[in-house]
Image (cartoon, rainbow, N blue to C red):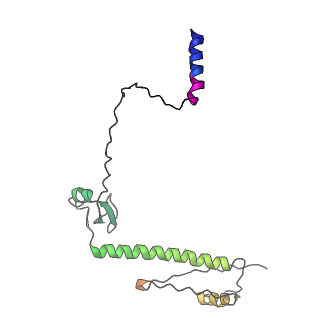
Amino acid sequence: MHCTFFLFILFYLLCLPLSPEGYITHDIVKSNSVLYAVKKKKKKIPKMVHITVSSDNEIGKKGQIKKVKLSHAFNYIIPQKLGYRSTIDELVEKEKNENTLRYIDEIKTSFLWEYKRRLNGLNIPFEFNKDVKIVVTQEDILDYVIYFGTYPIIYRFMNNINIDITVHIIKIND
């Protein structure tokens, strides 16, 4: 019995590629689960407001501008008089101060890095008499550097903010 079954399968496998007809089975299988498409809800982006802190507390220090949720501001901070809604002038002043200081830091860093790179391994000789106080200005160093190359860098900011660069002169023993 087993031999005929295997022979039938072998015969079927050998003859199937030769026949041009296809066979369809009528077996119907009932699904065991149903899938539903569920629309994903978008997360709500909370509305934020700027609050100026009125006194030192858990929110921040006096005069500091914080960005908090709108609901938190109107349900907790403002009713308890921990802060008030920032005015446009305060926000403009904050933006001006933060951005100006950030740009100054970036410019100082790039300015100093450029000069360190160009002056790498170069000693600038200054002669001093003993017990004499001397001020070396930025122009003195720039005059010396101009001999090796010119590096014009000009930065101007609002409210007359200037960039101060400190030069440390070290005595080298020969």
* The one of 128 and 7 positioned closer to us in this rendering: 7
Point out residue 12 in the picture as x, y percentages from the top left corner. 56, 22
Quadrant in the rendering for residue 7: top right
The residue positioned 27% from the left and 69% from the top of the image is 86
Quarter of the image with the C terminus in it? bottom right
Q: Is residue 110 shown to the viewer in this render?
A: yes
Residue found at the far right of this picture = 174
Q: Is residue 9 above or below residue 115?
A: above
Q: Is residue 33 above or below residue 137?
A: above
Quadrant in the rendering for residue 144: bottom right
The residue positioned 28% from the left and 60% from the top of the image is 47
Q: Is residue 7 above or below residue 14?
A: above
Stretch of the chain drawn in magenta: 12-21
Horizontal relation, residue 129 to residue 167: left or right: right
Point out residue 155 in the picture as x, y percentages from the top left corner. 50, 84
Horizontal relation, residue 163 to residue 96: left or right: right
| Main secondary structure found in the magenta portion | helix
* The one of 130 and 144 positioned closer to us in this rendering: 144
Residue found at the far top of this picture = 1
Horizontal relation, residue 33 to residue 8: left or right: left
Quadrant in the rendering for residue 74: bottom left
Point out residue 99 in the picture as x, y percentages from the top left corner. 42, 74
* Residue 15 magenta-highlighted: yes
* Residue 8 magenta-highlighted: no
* The one of 110 and 80 positioned closer to us in this rendering: 110
Point out residue 169 in the picture as x, y percentages from the top left corner. 66, 80
Quarter of the image with the N terminus in it? top right
